[in-house]
Image: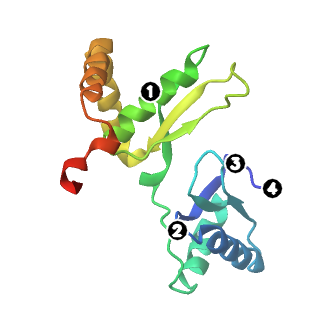
Amino acid sequence: MLDSGNAVTVFRSADPGRGAQAGLVAYRLREAGIEAEIFDPGEIVGTCEVRVDEANRARAEEIIAAMPGHLEGDTSPAYDLVTVFTSDGAAAEIEALAVKGILESAGLHVTLMGAPQIPSLPFEVKVPRAEAEIALEAIAAAQAAGPAAAEAAEAEAESFPPPEEIGQDQNQ
């Protein structure tokens, strides 16, 4: 098992065949004598990574570069997830879900980490490093606007016709 403190990502994919791709990459690296671990966290839906020890990074990257071109992946640190919001306590999940909604409405890629089964653990909202500054600005703007802005947005949303009525005039 790799030491998580020294493990680095050498392959990352969110493609539909990501599991098979990561398996092939890990297999080829192990064939070359490099300990490789597939990282497919259940909380981060849609991604799969292959990690190796930092000392083997350059050699692993060479092996991956020589593999068939159908392997798509990006190991850029810009896609590493960073925490932009943490909450604990009785309302932690609700607060984290609210922040997740704010960030998703801003078009950001958001991951919610937490364990609803264990309410004493904190909830975290994470985004790719490249989107962290925008996420923090969106959170600050929502906090500055306060509950009144949320209530106004909810009232405005309630004034829209139900989805089943939209376009009904055009069909008649």
Residue 22, x across and y down, in percent? 64, 69
Which residue is rendered at x = 73% and y = 79% of the image?
32
Q: Which mark is nearer the camera, 2 or 3?
A: 2
Tag 1's secondary structure?
Answer: helix
Residue 63 - label: none
Per the model, the C-alpha gap separating discs 4 and 3 is 9 Å
Mark 3–mark 1 distance (CA, rounded to whole Å): 31 Å
Check disc 2 and report the residue beneath it.
15
User: Label 2 vs label 3: CA separation?
Assistant: 25 Å
Q: Secondary structure at mark 4?
A: loop
User: How many labels, in total?
Assistant: 4
Q: Which residue is mark 4?
A: 1
Q: Which residue is mark 1?
A: 98
Q: Nearer the N terminus, badge 4 or badge 1?
A: 4
Query: Closer to the N terminus: mark 3 or mark 1?
Result: 3
- Check disc 3 and report the residue beneath it: 4
Q: Amino acid at mark 3?
A: Ser
Q: Amino acid at mark 2?
A: Asp
Kind of element beneath mark 2: loop
* Labelled pair 2, 3 in contact (Cβ < 8 Å): no
Q: Residue at x 50, y 62 (%)?
A: 75
Q: Nearer the viewer, mark 4 or mark 1?
A: 1
Whether residue 82 is situated above or below residue 96 in the rendered picture: below
Which secondary structure, mark 3? loop
Looking at the image, is mark 4 or mark 2 earlier in the sequence?
4
